[in-house]
Amino acid sequence: MTELREWFRRLKDKLVHILVYLALIAALTPLFSVLWEVFRRGISAINLDFFVKPTPAVGEVGGGVANAIQGTLITIGLASLIGVPIGIITGMFLSEYSETRLSSFVRLFNELLNGMPSIVIGLFAYALIATKIGFSVTAASFALALIMIPIVSRATEEALKLVPATIREAALALGMPRWKTAIFVALRGARKAVATGVLLAMARIAGESAPVLVTMGYWKWWFTGFDRPVAYLALNIFLFAKSPFENWIALAWGSALILVVIILGINVIVRLLMREKSL
Amino acid sequence: MADSGRASQNHTFFPKASSNGKGKLKVFLIGDKAFKVFTAVVASSTFLIIGLMVYYLYLGSWPSIEKFGMGFAVGIEWNPVKGVFGALPLILGTLVTSAIALLIALPVSLGVALALSEYMPKKLSDIFSFFVELLAAVPSVVYGLWGIYVLIPFLREAIYPSIKSSLGFLPFFSGPIYGGGVLTAGLLLAIMITPIMSAIMRDLFILTPSALKEAAIALGATKWEAIRTMMSYARSGIIAATILGLGRAMGEAMAVTMVIGNRFQLLPSSLFDAWYTMAAILANEFIEAIDHLHISALINVGLLLLVINLVVLICARLVIWRHLKAVGGIMRE
């Protein structure tokens, strides 16, 4: 009897061992399929025209996503202009005054903002800005900036915590006021880690399409002003994917490929750098 | 080194009463005060953002709230021509697709997290963890594109017919097969939230004290029995990770609208049928809505989504606060 039970326990143990590996395979198969299909179908869509020509009109042959690349860069630049300073200053507050009651509330609200569906953030930017100046790159950048703030502030806080206390203390002992120490010693020492955080935030918003959709909609032309929309690479994928036109669908896969390469590239580089640092 | 950020907190580096340097000290301290106030004000902007978000969405949905009131959340008709809007089918669609996603993603993520933290050799596990974290960064619209052109044809040709022929006697596996639909959306969501959930759970398992497992093994437990002991310790963390996955699944707009079929109906005829979710209708209709009331109803849907999401996130936070004060880093991105 006990032998049977013993045997059963060992069987269960083996079974779980197999199950966890099955789960790993089940999780990784679709994910590798995504990467493989994006690569396979995207690579055939990419040529010189892809990078230098704007969105083709319906029925037109060829064309590219040059206008969307321009629009994406402008939008991310503008979003960073708003989101990065706020994120960094928030991160500095969280690390310098980390024990205060206010800072734990700020952390909580950052988490809430971070977990908010991006389309809801887009609707907020629509209601706040787009209802006044119309669907525009400004409204979209504002929405994307809100997505950046929690990511940047978290990265900054973590980076500042890694600055050795001895360095701060040395500065303070030399009579440097605390604010100067925080900016010129701690933040300076952590600038690389902060920069990687900013890069990750940029990579994240480069892939966002829902907030961009509700704040500027589709735009098939070049940049014409900050109160007008621009084309956005991630959103282009959505527009092209739903269309019945062969060359638009090809452009969707091509856009997906360059987005994935850029976003995963940034992530890989950042993680490799971080790993080196922690060793 | 570890908690160095706090080290400078309690220092009193100024002599309390210096005889003639008082004026200077005051000036010196004003800089610090100003720094603290300035950073605190900027940091507080998150309160302002969340507050304004609720306020502006409320303002934007006012025409809809005024006309339908609470009935909006239980209304079952969505007709821009007649100007009648109700969101119950959308709420149901959101809950059902997220539930399907969690039903699939929870066991898989648990398995992945265990494989990475307990079963694999460290070197191999580092590589796979790296992949899993990387895959959490793939944009949702790319998953949607893959869903349309790879997942849907695959499910339609290879998987759904056999499910239907073997389980077709069950009402929710009986309808016609389109490829896209409720089950496809749930599955795609599961694929999308699995990386983030397993990354959180893996961190959680690594952080649980190994003494627990060692004690169990020493008492003659098998590896799985030891892991179960450890998992009961990490239970609240697993719950929190699941709630966070739920939040992600409910708020996902683009990928879902690309595969769910976007049909407004109270209940689908089967899991193969098309449906709608709150986020999906926003992605699909918002940009084309012209009518004032229609736009307002859509913003009202956004407001509902915001409120549900805040509740979900705060629940996750409370679970963590209550049980897991010791385990940090679990709410990481």
Image: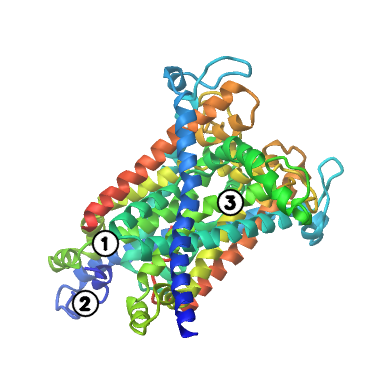
In-front residue for pair B281/A164: B281
Mark 2 falls on what kind of element? loop
Kind of residue at disc 3? Leu
Give the class, few, some or many, for how many residues have Cα within 10 Å of label 3's Cα (few <14, many ≥20): many
Instruction: Give the x, y percent position of residue A117.
Output: 57, 53
Residue positioned 16% across, 63% down in the render: A167
Tell me the quarter of the picture where residue B51 sits.
bottom right
Image position of A254 (left or right of B304)? left
Disc sitting over residue A61 in the figure: none
In-front residue for pair A155/B16: A155
Q: Is residue A224 above or below residue A119?
A: above
Q: Which residue is mark 3?
A: B189
Tell me how the rendering is colored.
Answer: rainbow
In-front residue for pair A23/A241: A23
Query: How far apart are labels 1 and 2 at the CA level?
Result: 15 Å
Give the class, few, some or many, for how many residues have Cα within 10 Å of label 2's Cα (few <14, many ≥20): few
In what quadrant of the picture does the N terminus of chain B appear? Answer: bottom left
Q: Which residue is mark 1?
A: A179
Mark closest to the chain's N terminus, 2 or 3: 2
Nearer the camera: disc 3 or disc 1: 3
Residue positioned 55% across, 38% down in the render: B146
Instruction: Give the x, y percent position of residue B117.
Output: 37, 64
Badge 1 and badge 2 in a common chain: no
Badge 3 and badge 1 in a common chain: no
Disc sitting over residue B12 in the figure: 2
Nearer the camera: disc 2 or disc 3: 3
Kind of residue at disc 1? Trp
